[in-house]
Image (spheres, rainbow, N blue to C red):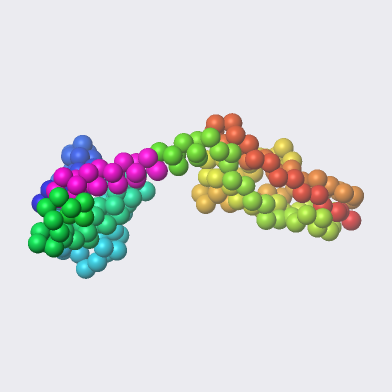
Amino acid sequence: MALTKSGEILKVKRLEKKLSFEEVEKETKIRMKFLRALEEGDLTLFHSTAYARGFLKNYAEFLELDTKLILALFRRETTLQKLKVIPQGMVEKNSPLRITPTRAALLVVFFILMAVSYYLFQQYRGFLAAPALTLEKPKEQQLVAEGEIEVTGKTDIDATILVNSQPAVLEESGRFSIKINVFAGETTITVVAKNRRGKETVITRKIKVE
């Protein structure tokens, strides 16, 4: 069976790492026959496409590949495998509805190019965009007691956070929490999220301290 694009990527990466199927099986707990089937694009061994997709994701993660791209390619490939070739007697020889090997190959190339283009677009947009930022506490115009209050929220995992110029620790999930001192009167809380490319997102909240 001819290799699929996702299967080719898996095989090339495994060989680059000088790993045998036995070694991969030992580390991933995925049986060797399933690993070989994924590389060869043979889905007949799997109970369902979803079952194969789960193994594919784990295999790609183990090889340190871009799982989003691999799964996108896999979706296109499995979609094409479901296309049924119309029997020759049902359409004329030159009918545009007849799926020939050449047309099928062109469709595969088209879907792969679309998947790669979409992935690159998302990466480019993420590169240009400012980090996402949500501020959960405190709420706008919230009434709090003078002293120490907690500021919590969430941002991108590669961002740094400043709350009223104080750095906050960022968890692996992107969540942050920091306690700051506030004094009687109206106080402004300023939260700044800045990514490695210098893009910033700022949220300000006014609270009332009594």
Q: How many labels does the image show?
A: 0
Residue 135 percent across, percent down from the top left = 67, 52
Identify the residue shown where x is 19% and y is 47%: 103
Identify the residue shown where x is 15% and y is 59%: 91
Q: Give the range drawn in magenta.
A: 99-119
Up/down of 107 relative to 129, above or below: below
Residue 71 is left or right of residue 19, and the answer is right
Residue 62 is left or right of residue 95, and the answer is right
Identify the residue shown where x is 90% and y is 49%: 185
Residue 48 is left or right of residue 102, and the answer is right
If the image is split into quadrants, where does the C terminus sit?
A: bottom right
**Observer-nearest of 121 and 19:** 121
Q: Can residue 26 be seen in this snapshot? A: no
**Figure quadrant of residue 78:** bottom left
Residue 137 percent across, percent down from the top left = 71, 55
What secondary structure do most residues of the magenta stretch adopt? helix
**Figure quadrant of residue 51:** bottom left
Question: Magenta segment: does it hold 31?
Answer: no
Identify the residue shown where x is 86% and y is 54%: 209
Residue 65 percent across, percent down from the top left = 31, 43
Residue 204 percent across, percent down from the top left = 75, 45
Question: Magenta segment: does it hold 114?
Answer: yes
**Observer-nearest of 207 and 210:** 207
Residue furthest toward the bottom?
A: 47
**Observer-nearest of 79 and 136:** 79
Q: Can residue 190 be seen in this snapshot? A: yes
